[in-house]
Image: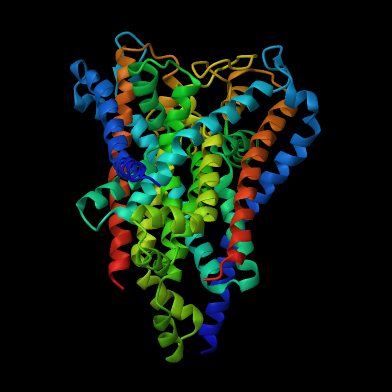
Amino acid sequence: MRDSRRYERVAFGVMAAATGIIIAPVLIILFIVLWYGVPGLSLEFLTAMPRDGMRAGGIFPAIVGTLVLTIGTAIFSIPLGILAAIYLNEYAGKNWMTRLVEISIINLAGIPSIVYGLFGLGLFVTFLGFGASILAGSLTLAIMTLPVIITATREALSSVPQQFREVSFSLGASRWQTVRGVVLPNAIPGILTGTILGLSRAAGETAPILFTVAAFYLPRLPESVFDQVMALPYHIYVLSTQVPNVSMKIQYSTVLVLVGMVFIMNIIAAYIRSKFRKRKTW
Amino acid sequence: MSRKFEYFIEKAIFLSGAASIVFVALIFIFLLKEGLSLFSEVNVFSFLFGTNWYPISDPPQFGILPLILGSLFVTFGAIVIAVPLGLGAAIYTAEVAPKSIRGILKSGIELLAAIPSIVLGFIGIIFLGPVLKNIFQLQSGLTALAGSIMLAFMAMPTIVSIIEDAIVSVPKSYKEGSLALGATHWQTIYRVILPAAASGILAAIMLGIGRVIGETMAVLMITGNAAIMPTSFLQPVRTLTATIAAEMGEAVSGSSHYYSLFAIGIILFIISFIINVLADIFMHRGKANR
């Protein structure tokens, strides 16, 4: 008996260590990015065009590019994702069609990001003739983000108690009126949280935009959805591997801006989740 | 609200539901459309098992075996690192950790998932590479090992959260029964809870593999990018994904080089399809057993 207690203590110690090994690097990475990135941050860095082959000046066009792509992704993926989740949770029966949709979503979620890039190149850039453009990049990112939004929305919808729907039906409301008036309002916080998390992932992606929109060096702002843009993730790739002699300060600060954007979105999502979880009374 | 609007919105809901099927089909069709053109020039066997990837020499050679092995090396290494650590962390967060710090641990792991892969690649070049170079006295630290370590951390959030879910969903009565028979908490975990969660753990490993094999940017940046037959973890390698990312920019549209990169895409699509269907089967079996 004493032996098994000792085993237990050792085993729990090992598992605590494993948890530490996973979490420590996160803190170290954040520390490094902040420590070396903050000194290079300035209003000029955030709002100026790059100069001298990206070795000086700011990263304004890359910031704008990433914002534009994130908004474009949201425009296409949010309505489609929410409607698809409503279908799965409120309308679909338990049949082969539903199962096929579920398997498709699982597979969409698992397809490597670079394969989305190939697909975007094949369909949007070449076949539909959009060229490398904001439109092609946003559509590619939107399809990639779709499974995240569908899964999160579905979870939010299914956490609305069944009685809510039954009461609504019993008052004579149709299925759509029930969804619109009862289910959706109660699921909004969960939908928002999942959607923001999905978009934050899209904002940080590089592989899908490589051949569909990202410009190597384009020191001006986009004028139409058929323009190419610079984007922060690709800019980091370019600075750290493609252009020689870029100062570390610029590289770290660019990384810091991307990490900052992604984390702000995550914090907003976490805030919405915790705020509404407290308010829930069922 | 008018009946007409309701009719249209319900049609839109149905179409959006079906859209996912359409997208998966479209992705596969467009990969095939561009990728299959390669096989009018190169036969499938020499594509899959050829040991030379020289797509732009004259005559070009399109053997992707070194790339497949590169992906396998890196994936194997990452899984060997990620599964034991992930399992430990999942057990710790689900069963052992005091309630007060459980939330903090979970947020820490979510934070790891939130870091874009390009950032991990950047940190890999600047810190991990030089560290490995010094430890193993290499010419360059950018090797299969560096890739494995970085990818292990990328797979970790997936692995930890799915195993944790599997552990939490084991019925409480199993655990209480075991404890009532006088087993210690640890004995209960590894004799009762883990076997009951086995399907979920398998699903987590499958999805972890899927995450690793599809990862592109970090791998492109830190594995050293040499398309040669790998023999050791301390050697630079090149994965399937990194090859597409590195070469598509230069490939001339409509050339056999261009088609060959889409053909690699077909391989990746099939691999991810198999992995995800397997993971789904494990997941469902886990639920059906209860």
Horizontal side of residue A40 vs A235, given as left or right: right
x and y percent of residue A156 in the render?
A: 46, 57
Q: Quick one: B59 or B175, which is closer to the camera?
A: B175
Horizontal side of residue B257 vs A258, given as left or right: left
Note whether B269 is above or below A47 in the view shown: below
x and y percent of residue A4 in the render?
A: 51, 84
Figure label count = 0
x and y percent of residue B76 in the render?
A: 40, 46
Q: Quick one: A240 or A205, which is closer to the camera?
A: A205
Whether residue A68 is visible here, answered yes or no, is: yes
In the image, what residue occupies the spot 43% across and 20% down? Answer: B247
In the image, what residue occupies the spot 65% across and 71% down? Answer: B100
In the image, what residue occupies the spot 81% across and 33% down? Answer: A39
Q: Quick one: A265 or B100, which is closer to the camera?
A: A265
Quarter of the view holding residue B40: top left
Whether residue B239 is visible here, answered yes or no, is: no
In the image, what residue occupies the spot 48% across and 58% down? Answer: B161
